[in-house]
Image (cartoon, coloured by chain):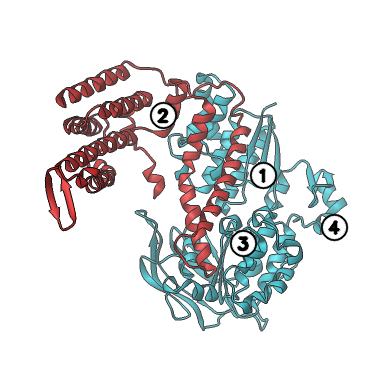
Chain colours: A red, B cyan
Amino acid sequence: MIAQRLEVGDAQLDSPLGRTSPVIKLAIAVVWLVGLALTLHPLPPLVLATAAIAAGLALGGVPPRGMAVTLAPLWIAALTVGISNMLFSAANADETSTTLLAVGPLRISTAAAAGGIAIALRAVAIACVGGVFALTTDSTRLADALVQQAGLPARFAYGALAAYQAIPRFSEDLATLRQARRIRGLRGGWHPRLLVGLLVLAIRHGDRLALSMDARAFGSGPRTHYRPMPWRAADGLVAVAAVAILAIALVLGR
Amino acid sequence: MDTGLVLQDPTSQLVMERVEDDVAFGLENRRWTRSAMVARVPTALEEVGLGGLGRRRSRRLSGGQQQRLALGGALAPRPGLLVLDEPTASLDIAGATDLMASLAALREERSTTVVLIEHQVDRAWPMADVILALDRDGRQIDVGAPDDVLARSAARMRDAGIWLPGEGSRTKLAGPGDPRDRTGATDPAVVAEGIRFGYERGEPVVRDIDLVAAAGERIALVGPNGSGKSTLGRLLVGLLRPDRGSVSLGGDEPSRLPAATLARRAGYVFQEPERQFLATTAGEEVRLGLTPEESARVDELMTRLDLPLERFSGRSPYRLSGGEQRRLSLACILIRRPKVLVLDEPTFGQDRTGYEGLLGILRDHLDDGACLIAATHDQRFVGDVARRIVTMADGWIASDETAA
């Protein structure tokens, strides 16, 4: 069920990476992505992807199977992006480029292949970093950290968290609406009307949720914290290690 | 003064992922110190019977537990006033009993004023010090001590569609001995053989169920929340396909029937009308997917359901009252005169007028020989309508007996 897919297990939550500040993890992900944009060399994305997976397995308590199940679809998507870039690259039309492969009207130049591979590898790296972040970051802790460490308004962070809790409900709403169409003799599949129905239900649900949050004095001013999120030495350690890994990756890719 | 609020639907009141975080949410907003919160959260959970469940994920609790969690969250800041809006409407009997026991304990303490808004008064009436009865437009009918209110205004309350304690419905369906009572009839309307069903990757919700429902039968499906009643209902009318076993609806597997054929053999009315509306106006809603012959019946049916087209045709289904929405969702199904009619919690949130109206509609429809299967927690509805009671527990049929 969708509910389970949105949950981070207790083992991952209590692992060293799970207890690392989500703000630090988010910052690392952003810095790594910026670093990747600086180079087209295949090594840096490979190094970062490997580092992310190793950290997830060793420090994040993610079981190898869980890691594979989460990342496999993302990798497939990443490879698809790379292949389509390879096929539709402008370099293929350039008569002066070296031909790597020609099948009938299809021609792939070495430049296009190199570009496609570079893009696929970067997409794989992004998928690994994002996947490991998601597998080791509890949504409650993320909201806590964004408010307490990054200074985000509580209204935004906890509002988003409450909406996130409601995602499984939307998939149930959709299933019900589709069944409602079938029992009224309307054909199955997609229909624009389903979106209208979903939107109405989402707004209604949001209304009730907001009422219930207001009734519990949400948004009435500054609030205290039941789960304090102080900075810890380990957060600094993780940050330094991440920057070092990025530096190594970029040096290898020169 | 601090106030607390508990609404009808438990899932739209839970903000945080884990139980203790949800209870602490209202305390954080009221700027309690951390040490005070750490001391208060477990006791608030104890007070509503959820002691020791603090680290659970609230989505994994049963409906009754979720509603008690909502109560715990509202009570944690020790409010001077607690307002509950039909808190037991979506709960099964055990869940409702537990919640009312929590409220009774709260009443003993006498530290909080409790305002309970409720249609089903049998449980609430004995706990009340003051009754305030309102009519449909929100005007006061009477206010005072329960006995005084009953003595002074019983008739006016009845006329306004309010249930009085211990009172039954005036509309009755055919009972034993009536020629229209079809209990014991044998021509099967829907037959399930060894059906099993589980949602994606989950445990089966319906396990190896055999059930034969005859034409003209009136069956109540009862059992706790999560026992598989709604899922079984959807399997019987082909909205879900069984993982194993087979269903036969008039000789065909309903989940393989084309939608247009299915809609004429079976009807299903979902618990929440809002989740089944598909059009922008009530007129459009009831006419969706009809043949010309069926369309010709719309006017008469809508009038009979007290939704005359001249007044309701252009109105948005979402802006009708709860009772009107329920009747509209019934109209959308009954217009095709399905031979098998499955209702999910048909009396949910209905006042007395809505309830009696529903029974009247069902009586007219069932006299044509249709088979009714209703998943319900409402004992009154079971007593008034069902001639056969199928009790479900944990995906199985625990008992199947003729109503007394």
Query: Can residue B224 be seen in the rendering of this structure?
Result: no
Asked if the residues shown at circle 2 and circle 1 are in contact, with their CB atoms under 8 angstroms apart, the answer is no
| Closer-to-camera residue (B343/A171) | A171
Q: Are marks 4 and 1 in contact (CB under 8 Å)?
A: no
Query: Mark 2 to mark 3: distance in Å?
Result: 41 Å
Of helix, strand and loop, which one carries label 4?
A: helix
Nearer the N terminus, badge 1 or badge 3? 1
Q: Which residue matches tag 1?
A: B85
- Real-space Cα distance between discs 1 and 3? 19 Å
Residue at label 4? B155
Q: Earlier in the sequence, mark 4 or mark 1?
A: 1
Type of amino acid at the residue the image marks with label 1: Asp
Question: Crowding at label 1, few (<14), some or many (≥20) Cα neighbours within 10 Å?
Answer: some
Say few, some or many: other residues with alpha carbon within 10 Å of mark 2 (under 14 / 14 to 19 / 20 or more): many
Name the residue furthest front.
A95
Quadrant location of residue B387?
A: bottom right
State the residue position of label 2: A141
Query: Can you tell which mark lies on residue B346?
Result: 3
Q: Residue at x 80, y 58 (%)?
A: B158
How far from the left and from the top, in percent, is residue B38?
A: 49, 24
Q: Report in which chain the residue with disc 3 lies.
A: B
Q: Amino acid at mark 2?
A: Arg
Which one is in front in this view, the residue at disc 2 or the one at disc 1?
A: 2
User: Can you say whether B215 is above or below A245 in the image?
Assistant: below
Q: Nearer the viewer, residue A94 or B301?
A: A94
For marks 4 and 3, the one nearer the N-term is: 4
Residue type, numbered disc 4: Ala
